Image: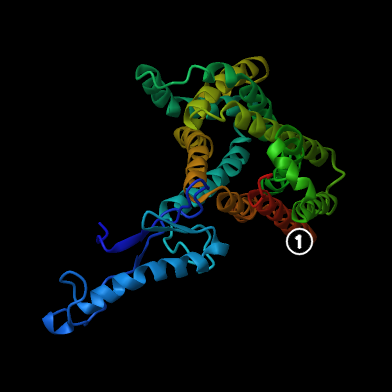
Amino acid sequence: MADKNEVPFTGQHPGRQRIGAGVHAVLHLDRPDPGEHRGPSAGKGRAGQTQPQADRLDHAPCREESLRRDCEDSAARIENGELRIENSKFKILNSKFNVSGTLAAVGSLCCWSTGPIIIKYLSGYLDFWTQNFLRYSVACLFWLPFLLFSIRTKRLDTRVWRRAILPATANVMMQSLFACAFYYIGPAFMTLLAKSSLIWIAGFSLIVFPEERALVKSKRFWTGLALSATGLLGVLCFKEDFAATKTLTGIVLALGMALLWAVYTLSAKIAFRDIDSRQGFSVITIYTVAGLSVLALMFGNLGECTQMGAPRWALVVISGIMSIALAHVLYYTAMRRIGATIPALIVLVQPFIILAISHVVFGESLNILQLLFGVILLLGSALAIWAQQHLKPPE
């Protein structure tokens, strides 16, 4: 609790969006200075007040007026005895490090980095249709209790059943191409190509979301897209076996997956704009499992899973829980707590983590030029993300 003679600094301006969360400060306008004498010998001012107290009361309005002038350029005002500041020129920064939000972002990165390695490893034991079905079934079972609880407590937004159809359809196609690509190319190369989804997401966003169209005038945004496209071409063209049929097949699958990832992401953003993302993802997993089960029955060989030992079944379960069920939730948690920019930038490190693991497990490597253009691709993506997150709203 603040003292009655203290003015709390709230860090929030009335009628404007809050910029810094958890910022705390106190301005002492009329608290006695340490060591100041407050006895009778200090002299009497107004109505039994000591002279220093009376002087401070006399000067308090002047101090408020001085603060008001100093904060004119800082979107600040003094209202009802409270100093409210947004983005002050005093450069008061939020020094509180959000540990949980940062750990959630790093956790999502770790979870998403396990998936490609496990998919590639299991490609020698399961066809991709069966593997997809099993992994998503685990994720569905993981979130099913939450969905049932929401239904039982009548917290489930019934609109989610209809709205999840389009994102789930895109997800079924995207997941099929995603898993299939690892049967043709290495995990690190595949993951780098998947980052080209930013180009599609940016293009579709400019068309679908009016608030994003201000990016057309952003030099940073276009520079980022140009760097991403250049990096993508370099990663592709400098691959030693680029012309091999197997490699070309994997590249087409990876680029198709990147396109469908953009469709899935934006359709989910539109569908669940005002719906709990956990409910939306729970329903999407149900629809996705239904679609993948049909594909597995038609084109896969479900009998293969009966021949796997316990260690490989454990990998299926770990992959389903970590890279599907938990990764998305951790990422959304990080976005809620530390904003969208930092988690998006952290996840860009994924291809290099996967490359390090894949080099040890599968002997995969990228040549110097591919690594160079891979860095350019990710730097371009980071620049485009930064431009998008610092987009000024239309006046």
Could you tell me which residue is drawn at 48 percent across and 31 percent down? 278
Residue 246 image-quadrant placement: top right
Could you tell me which residue is drawn at 22 percent across and 82 percent down? 36
> How far across and down, in percent of the image, does residue 244 sit?
85, 42
Q: How is the image coloured?
A: rainbow
* Rendered-image quadrant of the C terminus: top right
Q: Nearer the viewer, residue 232 or 132?
A: 232
> How far across and down, in percent of the image, does residue 367 sit?
76, 59
Q: Is residue 151 visible?
A: yes
> How far across and down, in percent of the image, does residue 290 sit?
57, 17
Q: Is residue 132 above or below residue 222?
A: above
Residue 185 image-quadrant placement: top right
* Rendered-image quadrant of the N terminus: bottom left
> Which residue is identified by label 1?
372
Q: Nearer the viewer, residue 270 or 242?
A: 270
Q: Is residue 133 left or right of residue 363?
A: left
Q: Is residue 345 left or right of residue 14?
A: right
In the picture as drawn, the residue positioned furthest to the bottom comes out as 41
> How far across and down, in percent of the image, does residue 288 sit?
58, 22
SS of the residue under disc 1: helix
Q: Is residue 181 visible?
A: no
Q: Is residue 231 left or right of residue 142?
A: right
Q: Amino acid at mark 1?
A: Leu
